[in-house]
Each structure stands twice: as C-alpha cells, then as structure tokens.
C-alpha cells in the first residue's frame, strides 16, 4: 500500500486545527469506559451535557439541502438483516447540506457530505455491484440528482466561499475533484479544508481487508496536506454546528449536528432512516418484532461491523443529541446521510 496521505499522519494534528473549531471534552471520559454496557450508559449521560452546550450556542444562519444520488444497497446490510422482505436491495438517497454559521464575527461556510457520485462508483463494492447488474440495470436503479457544482451554482454560492467540507465517514468518498489542484494548479474549492477524524485517516492509510470493500484508497491523493484537518474528538464551529465522534460503523466516524429554529438535528449513516432509531415504532416488516424480541432501541447500518457495540452506542448518542420532532417526542430529528427511500420508511427526515 503506498503512503497515500502522509508519512506521519500524526503531524496533521496539533498546529492544523483552525481557530473556528472549539474542542469539547464532555464525552472524552465516557468513551474511555472499559465495559461496553457501562460505556453506553456513560455516553448517554455525557451526551446530555454536550447537547445542552450545543443548543446554548444558538442556531446556524442557514441550511440548504440537495439530493445527490439514489442507489441500491443490500437489505441485509442496511437494516441489519432484521427486515422481513424478499427484496435483496433497498434504495437509498444520498444528500448534501450547505451550512452557514456565525463564527468569530464572520460567516463560516461548511459543506456536509459533498459526495462526488461519479468517483464514488469506483469503491470496490459499488464497482462489483455494477458488474453484476450490468450498465443498463445500473442506470435503471441508480440515479444522479445533482452534483456539488450544480448545487452550489443553483444556490448562488461561489466555490471559493466554502471554508470547510466534511463527511460523516469516508466510505465511497473521493475528494480529489473538490480539493486536489487541477491542471491549472487550482482546486475547485480553492479555500476549503477537509475536516476528518484522525481515525479515518489512519484506516485509509492502511486498510484492513474487511474495510477495503468500502473505501477508495486514492481518495486524498494530491490533496495538499494543509487542506486536511485531522480531528481527534468533538468540536463546535460557531453557533449551532458540531462534529461529534460516533465510532463503530468506522473507527473515524463522526456525526454532524446542526441547530435550527426546530432544535438540533443529527446527520450520519449509522442508521439509514429514522425507523432505525425507533425500531419499536417501525412499520417496516420484521423491524418492530426484532426490537421487541431483542430489547434493542437501534438497528445498525451494518455494512462493515467494525465495532457494532460502539455503533449502537453512537446511535444512542445521536438520539440524545437530536431534538424531538415537534409534537412527536418519540421521534429524533435525524437526517440519514444516505436515507432509505424504498421500501418507504415509516418516518422521513424525522417527520411523519
Ligand atoms: Zn459506510
């Protein structure tokens, strides 16, 4: 494996954290709890303290959302094998958010999950799926709705105005089209930096065979080191935006938290729809029964199972951080970064 990121990834740490980012330590001790069951309780408790701090910062200035692509995904992975359906594939829809926050007397502009659908298709899993179905079937199943370039143009946002980009994790992501200098020596997002957990960079630098399926190893090749900010924990940016570690699906997974007039929303791919966070209320066949029989409160997006117990704990943390849907205190305001669209989930976007 070539050295794809840097010879010594630790060097990214110290000096590279921008002043906009404020480290939050509320969850540090909880995550270090040794027993998985005790860790779940500790993270749930500490999550309440972090939630209060995030909400106290007020709301972001704006959030815009764009659907990127719809694509097939194995049912047994997306719903942890508990859904009683004969359909081997679900359809998920990925989406991106543009968030503007007040930070240090100016506006910081953050792109959340700016997926490049064309480059995503190179992830080994996606490439194999395409081989199996053939080009025609793939065109029928998979559909690109917009690109990052089209979405920014539609919103009237200049690419140079973007300060940060971040993904909840780097599965099937490739940022070279956004951050690597092109033939003219300039990157498309010339002023943007990638905010990524160190754990994700470490995984990428030396992939385990069970991780390789989902990553594009060259995804950062050519991106200047000073455009990659390696995080090691939870951070606030300005008022109403936070990056919160949610390990499990991947070691360097994190959840983006946005505060609007409706309170806090969580964004990740730990669960593929709100049903996954309230499985006991789900109308998807087999899901509520599984929750009842096993006494569980979350259904994992189980594509990798890097650390399933922590992924479950991370989903409980997300439920703790997310505000409830108005008039539905049982439903968290969670936005799956790739959301189930078929079969239709019981709850969409945390809204009935
Ligand atoms: Zn993933």
Image (spheres, rainbow, N blue to C red):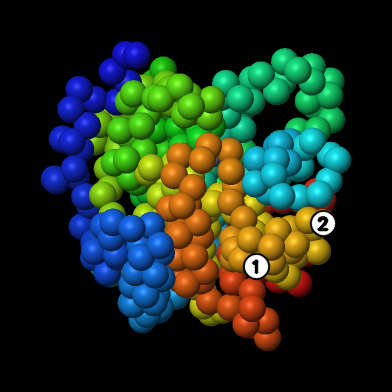
Residue position marked by numbered label 2 in the rendering = 285
Identify the residue at image location x=58%, y=29%.
Answer: 120
The mark found on residue 256 in the picture is none
Residue 215 x/y as whole percent: 48, 28
* Residue at mark 2 to residue at mark 1: CA–CA distance: 14 Å
Q: Are marks 2 and 1 in contact (CB under 8 Å)?
A: no
| Residue in the foreground of this view, choosing between 338 and 76 | 76
Label 1 neighbour load within 10 Å: few <14, some 14-19, many 20+: many
285 left or right of 234? right
Residue position marked by numbered label 1 in the rendering = 278
Is residue 158 shown to the viewer in this render? no
Identify the residue at image location x=22%, y=32%.
Answer: 9
48 left or right of 7? right
Q: Give the residue furthest to the front.
A: 293
Identify the residue at image location x=84%, y=24%.
Answer: 137
| Residue in the foreground of this view, choosing between 344 and 23 | 344
| Residue in the foreground of this view, choosing between 319 and 166 | 319
């Amino acid at each position: 494996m070539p050295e794809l990121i840097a010879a010594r990834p630790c060097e990214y740490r110290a000096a590279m954290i921008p002043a906009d980012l404020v480290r939050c330590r509320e969850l540090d001790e909880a995550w270090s709890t040794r027993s998985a069951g005790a860790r779940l309780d500790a993270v749930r408790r500490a999550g309440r303290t972090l939630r209060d701090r995030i909400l106290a910062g007020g709301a972001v200035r704006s959030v815009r959302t764009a659907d990127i692509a719809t694509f097939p995904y194995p049912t047994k992975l997306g719903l942890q094998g508990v859904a009683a359906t004969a359909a081997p594939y679900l359809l998920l829809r990925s989406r991106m958010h543009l968030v503007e926050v007040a930070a240090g007397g100016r506006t910081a502009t953050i792109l959340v999950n700016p997926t490049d659908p064309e480059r995503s298709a190179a992830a080994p899993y996606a490439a194999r799926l395409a081989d199996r179905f053939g080009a025609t079937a793939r065109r029928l199943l998979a559909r690109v709705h917009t690109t990052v370039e089209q979405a920014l143009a539609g919103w009237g946002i200049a690419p140079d105005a973007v300060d940060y980009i971040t993904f909840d994790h780097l599965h099937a992501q490739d940022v070279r089209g956004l951050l690597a200098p092109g033939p003219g020596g300039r990157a498309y997002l010339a002023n943007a930096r990638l905010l990524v957990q160190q754990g994700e960079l470490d995984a990428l630098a030396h992939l385990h065979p069970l991780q390789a399926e989902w990553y594009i190893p060259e995804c950062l090749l050519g991106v200047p080191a000073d455009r990659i900010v390696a995080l090691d924990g939870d951070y606030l940016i300005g008022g109403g935006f936070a990056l919160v570690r949610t390990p499990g699906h991947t070691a360097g997974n994190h959840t983006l938290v946005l505060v609007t007039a409706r309170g806090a929303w969580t964004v990740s791919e730990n669960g593929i729809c709100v049903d996954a966070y309230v499985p006991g209320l789900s109308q998807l066949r087999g899901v509520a029964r599984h929750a009842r029989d096993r006494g569980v409160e979350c259904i994992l997006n189980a594509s990798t199972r890097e650390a399933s117990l922590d992924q479950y704990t991370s989903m409980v943390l997300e439920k703790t951080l997310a505000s409830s849907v108005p008039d539905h205190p049982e439903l968290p305001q969670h936005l799956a970064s790739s959301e189930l669209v078929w079969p239709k989930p019981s709850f969409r976007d945390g809204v009935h």
